[in-house]
Amino acid sequence: MPLPPHKLTIRGGCNCGAIKYEISIPEIAQRPLHPSSSATDILCLPFIATDHCNDCRSALGTILPMWICSPISMIKASVVLRSKASLPSEASKRKNEIDEPRTPYLPAHNIFTPGSISEDSFLMFFESSENRRRSFCGRCGTNISYAALPMPEGWPDMLDIVLGTVDREDLSGEALKPERQLWWDCGIEWIKDMSVQGVGEVPRHPDYKVDVVDEGK
Ligand SMILES: [Zn+2]
């Protein structure tokens, strides 16, 4: 399902709140086309995709990664300043309760570049292969992004954002359902089946009750 044609903003971040982002998507007439687009197969940027490649599966520790593949120019990010942050053990308490000292929302290019303002943040980088840069939060471990550097000719600079980091309120509509499956031929058969058909008729497990677990029952 393509992203809706109107202007929209998608917000998200890591689990502890040290890294937050906003993706400002213009109305459809102003979105660049994916370089593979043709008259019969139009795909605008950004787009949402599942990803069956081996590298992303293992790097993210996720059976079926999903991405918002976005021009980096549409993304702004804000990071907590590491030099002024509280102790890591307090991260979960801080998530929604305490305003930590952080940067304003700045162009993502200024944040998602090693040696930039990210030096004083929890944003960490990992080159999973040559010119393939991933980022994650060094405080809570959330995977955030992927970038190929430089992009092939004809592409804008891109920053793919892990779809699971989008705030729940922005995920809960139908707007962010994937419209493409990437690297299909690299995929594992049962995962490909699941991506098309779901997991099938398996029993729904009852939710755990925290008080019962705490009592060891
Ligand atoms: Zn974090």
Image: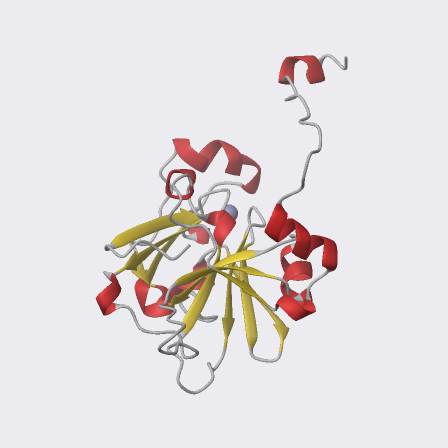
Please say if 41 is above or below 119.
below
Q: Horizontal and vertical percent for residue 21?
A: 37, 53
User: What is the count of numbered marks?
Assistant: 0
- Residue in view at x 68 percent, y 69 percent: 186
Q: Residue at x 45, y 36 (%)?
A: 95
Q: Residue at x 70, y 18 (%)?
A: 213
Q: Is residue 166 above or below residue 5?
A: above
Quarter that holds the N terminus: bottom left
Q: How is the image coloured?
A: secondary structure
State the image coordinates of residue 166 (x, y, percent, origin top left): 44, 47
Q: Position of residue 158 (x, y in %)?
A: 42, 71
Residue 41 located left or right of residue 199:
left
Q: Is residue 76 left or right of residue 188?
A: left
Foreground of the two, 154 or 213: 154
- In this view, the residue farthest toward the bottom is 153
Q: In the rendered image, which quarter contains the C terminus?
A: top right
Task: Write the residue at 66% across / 49% down.
Answer: 194
Measured from the top left, where is residue 93 in percent x and y? Answer: 49, 31
Residue at the outermost front position: 40
